[in-house]
Amino acid sequence: DSGVTQTPKHLITATGQRVTLRCSPRSGDLSVYWYQQSLDQGLQFLIQYYNGEERAKGNILERFSAQQFPDLHSELNLSSLELGDSALYFCASSETGGGRQPQHFGDGTRLSIL
Amino acid sequence: GQQLNQSPQSMFIQEGEDVSMNCTSSSIFNTWLWYKQDPGEGPVLLIALYKAGELTSNGRLTAQFGITRKDSFLNISASIPSDVGIYFCAGGNNAGNMLTFGGGTRLMVKP
């Protein structure tokens, strides 16, 4: 158990809809990362937050957004969903987000778009 | 963008054999990490490397951070059935922001 909690484990919805994925980092970790894992693209970095502030952005679509709340949990919002958004979405956390701190991953949310 | 080439893509070995997999990059990374992912779970950290040339062991696992900072390898000695899974390398930058992942090595172990 990595200590990173993601909910829900599975989500099935339709095209055009909006969903919110939730992540609670490990106790004491201030930085949260979101990744997308798909069969054709592999594991891709989306966005990082540190202590409530956005710190780094990867190839995140404009339809996607995230935030980190004062209690340090984070939410990833996906809107106007398309079939290609079907993937596993992982959250990871680290102590301060510095380069010498490994990221620990949750078990992911599997998103299926019908 | 940065890309990591991980090889082999898959391996099917006999229990007890040693395994070697590696990652190469056209860009320099300042950290290298190795993760294992089992079905239905997230990647689990195996080994983290922070210095060029560093060789680190974790039980039967040994990993090295290449001296050029563009490659890393992972060795597993005396494989056992529970080693089955997908192994990913990941490169990180100084700021510790994004990890760039390799495409994974699927390991299958025959008892």
Image: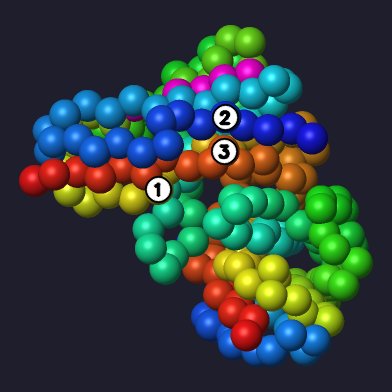
Going from N to C along the chain, the mark reached first, 3 or 1, is: 1
In the picture shown, does residue B12 fall above or below B86? Answer: above
Which residue is identified by label 3? Answer: B102
**Any mark on residue A76, and which?**
none
Contact, mark 2 vs mark 3 (Cβ under 8 Å): yes
Prevalent SS, magenta region: strand
In the picture shown, does residue A44 fall above or below B54? Answer: below
Chain on which label 3 sits: B
**Closer to the observer: label 2 or label 1?**
2
Chain on which label 2 sits: B
Would you identify the image quadrant in which residue A71 lies? bottom right
Q: Is residue A8 left or right of residue B22?
A: right
Magenta span has B74? Answer: yes
Going from N to C along the chain, the mark reached first, 2 or 3, is: 2
Which residue is identified by label 2? Answer: B5
Q: Is residue A108 left or right of residue B7?
A: right
The amino acid at mark 1 is: Ile
Chain on which label 1 sits: B
